[in-house]
Amino acid sequence: MSAIKKFPDTISIVLMIMVFFIGLTWLVPAGRFDRAEVQVGQEVREVVVQGSYKRVEQSPQGLSALLTAPIRGFAAAAQIIAFVFLVGGAFGILNRTGAIVAALRQLIARVSDKPRGKALVIPSLMVLFSLGGGSFGMSEEVLVFILITVPLALALGYDSIVGVAIPFVGAGAGFGAAFYNPFTIGVAQGIAQVQPFSGIEYRLLVWAAMTTAAVVFVMLYARRVEKKPELSIMYEFDKTRDLSHFHNDQTEAFTLRHRLVLLTLLGALVMLVVGVNQWGWFINEISGLFLGMGVVAAVIFRLSARQSVEAFVEGARDMMTAALVIGLTRGLLLIAEDGHLIDPLLQAIASGAQGMHPSISASIMFLVHGAINFFVPSGSGQAALTMPIMAPLSDLLGITRQTAVLAFQLGDGLFNLIIPTSGVTMGVLAIAKIPFDKWFRWCWPLMLVFIGVGILSLIPPTLLFEWQ
């Protein structure tokens, strides 16, 4: 009997997409929009000039572009790659103290024989992550929590899919249906010339609906896996994960030092939220925050300098695959930019959306942004690219610009959960050691639910009231 063919690993998938993009640069007629710099809040952004699309000389990419894309991608994504290594190292120190394991064992002991308490773990955590996505645009920060939620889910009798879904789907639902995300709503409304952060009342309703849909979907799956573990698509692999330290009665008790280390982690997370919201923190500041957390944890637990360095290196080593994936995905997006693939797509969409009912046009805008997200996973980047076209186009289609912004944020945020060109998505899966095909198999029904909720969310402001 022939051996069963395995689905390609994450890095192989990215490399295949890179080759596919190279082929598209030979087939898709090249074109581009003119760009102009505009002031958006405190920043100057480059935006597309409506009506400026023109054909340009074809710029097919070849073997040289394919071979240099990885190093160019690493250079372009150097900051986020360094972030992944540094945070992974900091959590390596945290893990060396045993504080997280001890705390999880305490949690498991308290809720394992109390069905009601156990049932509240998933929804309560997902709502918290959704609040993070909806308020300060939690995205890359999710990478930090995978190291905690995957072993938590496994120890509670679920699977690694649930462990990823808690922070990633939770934050993703909040990000897509955000009510105060400065990186999507703030930028998009500024470009569309809409009052910054206006329309929050209706966005809160959309956020609540999307978060509820996410929680219900994950809870139903978790209950099925809990009752019959063989139903998990990660069943065979999860059996190989070592969780003996969660169930070993000889494991060190939950000591005062463990509590102090966890208080340090909690303090870092509080500072993360405050820093992002109040002080404009981003990758550099967040990296420094978690490095500081690792140092304080080492001091509290009296780890020697050698032990701390060894733990840091071990934690950083675990992030190697995630870092490779992030660099490669950025490289394939550079191929798309150099080959003039993105602007022709925008032009085709803008031309095809005219002449339809406003509710249909708004839904098409939503789905179009999801498609564009394959090429431009960055929320603020996609806003700067598409909103100069979509905002004036919405005027012609009978859609308010506020609704156009909602269509953008839904399409940009929700589809990030499933596209292989997103460095965050592939990084999350690499950290959790979940193959992309298994994640896609689990996630596509959830995406259909999200698409349905998104389309329904766009109907009221196009039929029932004029949302300014």
Image (tube, helix red, strand yellow):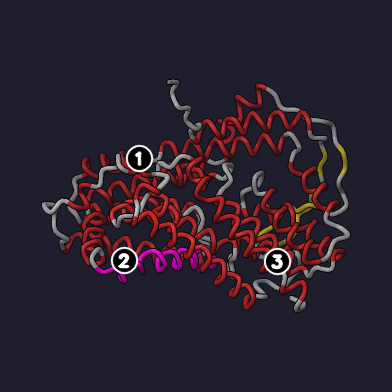
Residue at 58%, 51% in the rendered image = 416
Mark 2 vs 3, N-terminal side = 2
Of the 4 image quadrants, the one containing the N terminus is top left
> Which residue is drawn at the image coordinates 85% and 61% (left, top)?
356
Q: Residues within 10 Å of mark 2 (few under 14, many from 20)?
A: some
**Mark 2 sits on what residue?**
118
Residue visible at 57% across and 45% down in the picture: 422
Position of residue 8 in the picture relative to residue 16 (left or right): left
Q: Position of residue 238 (x, y in %)?
A: 34, 43
Kind of residue at disc 2: Lys
Q: Main secondary structure of the magenta part?
A: helix
The kind of residue tagged 3 is Gln
As drawn, the label of residue 236 is 1
Q: Secondary structure at mark 3?
A: helix
- The x, y position of residue 419, in whole percent, is 58, 46
Q: Which residues are magenta?
A: 114-136
Residue projecting furthest to the front: 1
Observer-nearest of 288 and 339? 339
Amino acid type shown at disc 1: Glu
Distance (Cα) linking label 1 and label 2: 24 Å
Label 3 belongs to which residue? 189
Q: Is residue 108 above or below residue 15?
A: below
Q: Relative to 435, say whether 359 is above or below.
A: below
Name which residue lies at 62% across and 72% down: 203
Q: Is 118 inside the magenta-drawn segment?
A: yes
Of labels 1 and 2, the one closer to you: 1
The reply to whether the magenta stretch includes residue 160 is no
Instruction: Give me the disc on residue 365.
Output: none
